[in-house]
Amino acid sequence: MVQIKARIILNKVIKADYWRCIMSAASVAKDAKPGQFINIKITDGLRPFLRRPFSINNINGRNLEIIYEVVGEGSAALARKKKGDFLDLIGPLGNVFSCTLAPSSRRLSILVGGGIGIAPLLFLARKIKAKNKIVLIGSRNKGQVLCEKEFRNAGCDVKISTDDGSVGFKGRVTDLLKEILRSKIIKPSSVFIYSCGPRPMLKELSGIAIKNSLPAQISLEEHMSCGIGACLGCVVKTKNGLERVCKEGPVFNASDLIW
């Protein structure tokens, strides 16, 4: 973990209220692994006061990429940043997806992302060496589907669900997962699930994994204050007791969480 001033190379809207920011951050990029995040101080002033956590979407050489949704004061301030501006960031933080658990060509990796939760799964998809990779992208509508092209370029079989049915499967991404698991071409014993998204989605996905005796790792999206485990503001209940999302997480085994 290091604290650096990262120079912005690109910061632009990519779809609806979603933005991509690319930063030159060699000292963070060289050690970053799928599942980890960075904590950014958006401005030099007191508003917003707290840093904001962002999943690492991709590493390209010395450059680090994030995708974010403009939903509040912090993300709106980040969207106003220009090429050449600097961001004070700490990272890489948190633990990682155990993508080495699915290295065999006989193992099927299913990556399930809901909304902006798709962001850390692209970095993961590019690190998984197995050829059999399916990514399920869940969004509210066609205009908010993220990273479809990038996942295809990473060798993934991409399937999309939308709440309104404007593209792909109509319904929740967890319902799409159930449909795939019922498919005769899928052998449950060969499946490993990775996921990130809204808490209700992750809770349902965990239930699906447990019911089908499938190993699954999920990345939790929680509000954080410090991002380094000091403030205890992002604690969740697990079978191992109370654990911090920013330190013991954000990646957890689905079977370990108590919802």
Image (cartoon, grey):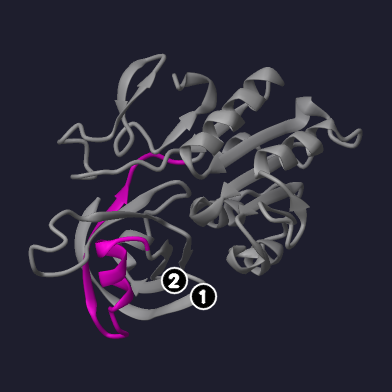
Query: Is disc 1 in contact with disc 2, using a CB cutoff of under 8 Å?
Result: yes
Residue at 13 percent across and 63 percent down: it is 47
- Give the mark nearer the N terminus: 1 vs 2: 1
Q: Residues within 10 Å of mark 1 (few under 14, many from 20)?
A: some
Which residue type carries mark 1?
Ile
> For residue 19, which numbered disc appears in the image?
2
Query: Would you say 34 lies left or right of 226 here?
Result: right
Q: Position of residue 81 (x, y in %)?
A: 28, 79
Query: Compared with residue 193, is residue 225 higher up or lower down, i.e. above or below?
Result: below
Mark-to-mark CA distance, 1 and 2: 5 Å
* Left or right position of 30 against 124: left
Q: Position of residue 221 (x, y in %)?
A: 40, 43
Inspect the image, locate mark 2, and give the three-letter code of the amino acid beneath it.
Trp
Query: Percent x, y for residue 117?
Result: 50, 50
Mark 2, residues whose alpha carbon is within 10 Å: few (<14), some, or many (≥20)?
Answer: some
Q: Residue at x 67, y 25 (%)?
A: 214
The quadrant in which residue 201 appears is: top right
Where disc 2 sits, the SS reads strand
Q: Decide if residue 108 is in sight here.
A: no
Magenta stretch contains residue 133: no
The disc label shown at residue 175, or none: none
Q: Which residue is mark 1?
A: 14
Q: Nearer the viewer, residue 203 or 66?
A: 203
Write down the region rendered in magenta.
71-96
Q: Position of residue 96 (x, y in %)?
A: 44, 41
- Count of numbered circles on the image: 2
Callout 1 secondary element: strand
- Residue that extends furthest to the front in the rendered view of this protein: 164
